[in-house]
Image (spheres, grey):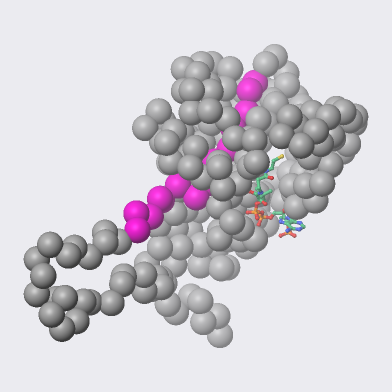
Amino acid sequence: MDSEKTIGTDSYYVEPMRIDDVPAVSRLERRCFTNPWPESAYRRELRNPANNFYVVLRWRSDRPQAETSPPEPRGRLALLPLIRRPEPPVTDSIVGFAGMWILYDEAHVTTIAVAPEHRGRGLGELLLVTLFDEAIRRRAEWVTLEVRVSNAPAQALYEKYGFTRQGLRKRYYSDNGEDAYIMWSPSLRDPAYQQRYGQLRERLFERLAAKGITAEKHGLPHPGH
Ligand SMILES: CC(C)(COP(=O)(O)OP(=O)(O)OC[C@H]1O[C@@H](n2cnc3c(N)ncnc32)[C@H](O)[C@@H]1OP(=O)(O)O)[C@@H](O)C(=O)NCCC(=O)NCCS
């Protein structure tokens, strides 16, 4: 029996990123990347939706959460009105984000990340599929991106979706001078790849559902429109 299912579900929603989301996205980005963008860069991106597409992944859970409140004050301390208990930690419901630029027939993935404590559940894949669906909807033919040569998890995710290494940008990352692989997807117009992509997408949603994870898209265009 799947014991996880008996103690609640995790719901995730992929929604368009809004200006109000930028502070939370930046906080999460600082946990996921060593060279985060300034908040102003996100605001600039969001002002140009014709060539951009940015989404956030929100999390809601009805599973019991770990107790984080400090113990009640005891004895005489409890009588002191000026000693306040600290506020409970604010939980950010944004646990992932992704974005891309779309220029002519190319979609260039600029960022994709999932909060460390939510990784390994198919959510990075959900974000990538969201980008792919939009790239297809906007009639892009190729998806491309740069990835650190040391970033094996991200490369494995891209390779799962058929990306291949097509070049190297020397010392691309300014924080440590690391090189980037340039990766390209297969043609989104190739019928064989369309079939493969459809299967991967279907399997992803089955896998999420089997784990009791509800993943929905809110306020995003339908892929086929
Ligand atoms: C890359 C990242 C978004 C993956 O997110 P995730 O939610 O953990 O990934 P998923 O659970 O959706 O995994 C999907 C696939 O990615 C690959 N993958 C993910 N984590 C992996 C790991 N630790 N090792 C190897 N492969 C991994 C696998 O192919 C996996 O498919 P599988 O489950 O069938 O094996 C996440 O690790 C992250 O946020 N990293 C920090 C930010 C970053 O490096 N972004 C990429 C910039 S180019």
Residue 78 in view here: yes
Please determine whether, in this image, residue 199 is positioned above or below residue 169.
Answer: below
Q: Residue at x 50, y 50 (%)?
A: 95
Query: Is residue 42 in the magenta section?
Result: no
Q: Position of residue 90 (x, y in %)?
A: 34, 54
Numbered label tally: 0
Secondary structure, magenta segment, majority class: strand
Q: Residue at x 56, y 58 (%)?
A: 118
Please determine whether, in this image, residue 125 is positioned above or below residue 77.
Answer: above
- Which residues are drawn in magenta? 89-102
Q: Foreground: 132 or 173?
A: 173
In the rendered image, the quadrant that contains the N terminus is bottom right
Q: Residue at x 48, y 75 (%)?
A: 5
Q: Position of residue 47 (x, y in %)?
A: 46, 17
In the rendered image, the quadrant that contains the C terminus is top right
In the image, 56: left or right of 65? right
Q: Residue at x 42, y 77 (%)?
A: 7
Residue 217 in view here: no
Q: Position of residue 210 (x, y in %)?
A: 57, 68
Q: Position of residue 64 (x, y in %)?
A: 38, 73
Query: Is residue 95 in the magenta section?
Result: yes
